[in-house]
Amino acid sequence: MEKQEKAMEYFQNGCNCSQAVVMPYAEELNVNEGIIQKMAVAFGGGMSKAGKVCGCLSGALMVIGLKYGEDSAKIVANRIKSYNEGQKFMKQFNETFGATDCRELIKLDLNKKEDMVQAQAKVFGSRCKNMVGKTIEMLEEHFLCNEE
């Protein structure tokens, strides 16, 4: 199963957007899927439902860090590579979706009961699910472009 399909399946089966984006990369990046799932949970809803950075983008940045950030505490070049790739990806995400913050993207405040109900009924299953899939597509293109 492709990463994009896997991510959308994770999302449909209850994972939040951040978890759904990062989990398909667990095996490839040699990281325990359960640990990734736990690590990413607080990033859903734009940083724990705060409406800030979209969980799809947070998940993508985690993947970029896992891919390029080996020993970034000791080897500054790896940290710089992660930062540069992350900045490129954030720019592309913003250009693709028109924003980087969850609240701007879904036009709802997930801390309000009525907005959460509306999100569950009308946004998560369509807009957010599609953003999860598109984010994976963008990551795959990003990595392909960087291998050349």
Image (cartoon, helix red, strand yellow):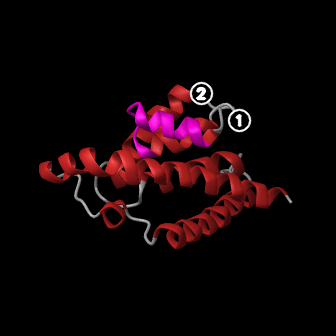
At horizontal 55% and vertical 54% (from top left) the residue drawn is 135
Name above or below for residue 112 compared with residue 13. Answer: below
Label 1 secondary element: loop
Look at the image and tell me in which quarter the C terminus lies. bottom right
Residue to which mark 1 is pinned: 28
Look at the image and tell me in which quarter the N terminus lies. top right
At horizontal 53% and vertical 73% (from top left) the residue drawn is 95
Residue to which mark 2 is pinned: 32
Q: Nearer the viewer, residue 74 or 25?
A: 25
Name above or below for residue 23 compared with residue 107. Answer: above
The image quadrant of residue 103 is bottom left
Residue 46 at x, y percent in the picture: 36, 55
Q: Which mark is residue 100?
A: none
Q: Nearer the viewer, residue 23 or 105?
A: 105
The stretch in magenta equals 4-17
Residue 134 at x, y percent in the picture: 55, 54
Q: Nearer the viewer, residue 79 or 20?
A: 20
Q: Amino acid at mark 2?
A: Asn
In the image, residue 136 lies in the stretch drawn in magenta: no
Q: Amino acid at mark 1?
A: Glu
